[in-house]
Amino acid sequence: MKQLDPSTIKAAVFDFDGTLAETNIDFGLMRSEVLVVAERWGLRDRLDDRRYILEIVDQALEALPDEPARKRFRQDAEEAMQRVELIATSAAAPFPGVPEALQSLLDGGMRVGIITRNCRVGVASVMDRHPMPHEVLLTRDDVELVKPEPEHLHAALRVLGVPADQALMVGDHPTDIETGRAAGSLSAGVLTAKTTREQFEDAGADFVAESVSTLVDALFAAAPGE
């Protein structure tokens, strides 16, 4: 793993669920609800339910014959996912110190973004109650390709005006590390969910921290002149 060098980092882009906020979304239930929709459409036997939920939806879309059918299925699946997501996000809150950590990055001149596979209304339900400073937020509703596709991160960095090699992607899951590596940025894992330090290291994380707050503390501690 690399030594932390804040002088090379001009932007930090964060995952949301499990990284900035503890939402406790029941992804098992969400998967089941999406598969119920697929069953209703006669697609259940054509899907690999071991894939991530959004990828299951994409697989179903590929099996449909035309754009009107794909549009209707996407709406049905999105409604099913949102029902589960909003149950959790209605009571979710940021991890301790997260709003302050994000503000300290902005105050220190770093650009700050958020990219997430969550829906915008779910993220907004948390942000409205617990504001978290940022300059760009791109949910699954805002982009065509979601992480781990690197375009999700690239889209945020275009808004921030920072090249990928001067950015840090931060998340709680190996796919966040995959996103950063594919985009050409540095990557950091935070131990706020189920991913272990060893799993982050195996995924190729440049840094691993206990939380967003401790990562930001480490950035400032390593800054020149500090």
Image: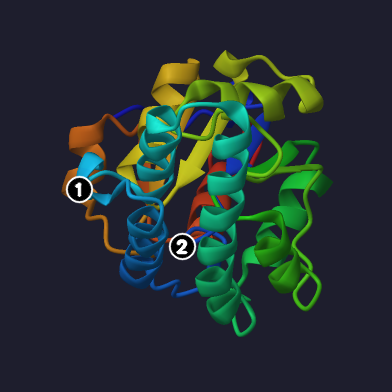
Residue at the outermost bottom position: 91
Looking at this view, is 208 or 58 the one in front? 58
Looking at this view, is 178 or 72 the one in front? 72
Q: Quadrant of residue 110?
A: top right
Residue sitting at x 51%, y 62%? 81
**Separation of marks 1 and 2 at Cα, in angstroms:** 21 Å
Q: What residue type is labelled 2?
A: Gly
Q: In the image, residue 140 lies at what x, y percent?
A: 61, 44
Residue sitting at x 56%, y 72%? 83
| Image: 196 above or below 178 | below
Residue sitting at x 42%, y 59%? 37
Q: In which quarter of the image is residue 154?
A: top right
Q: In the image, residue 1 lies at what x, y percent?
A: 28, 30
Give the side of residue 193 with respect to residue 161, left or right.
Answer: left
Tag of residue 226: none
Q: Residues within 10 Å of mark 1 (few under 14, many from 20)?
A: few
Give the side of residue 71 with respect to residue 188, left or right.
Answer: right
Badge 2 is on which residue?
18
Q: SS for tag 2?
A: loop
Badge 1 is on which residue?
50
Looking at this view, is 100 or 219 the one in front? 100
Q: SS for tag 1?
A: loop
Q: Which amino acid does label 1 sit on?
A: Arg
| Image: 221 above or below 181 | below
Q: How crowded is mark 2: few (under 14 residues within 10 Å), some or many (20 or more)?
A: many
| Image: 193 above or below 201 | below
Q: Quadrant of the C terminus?
A: top right
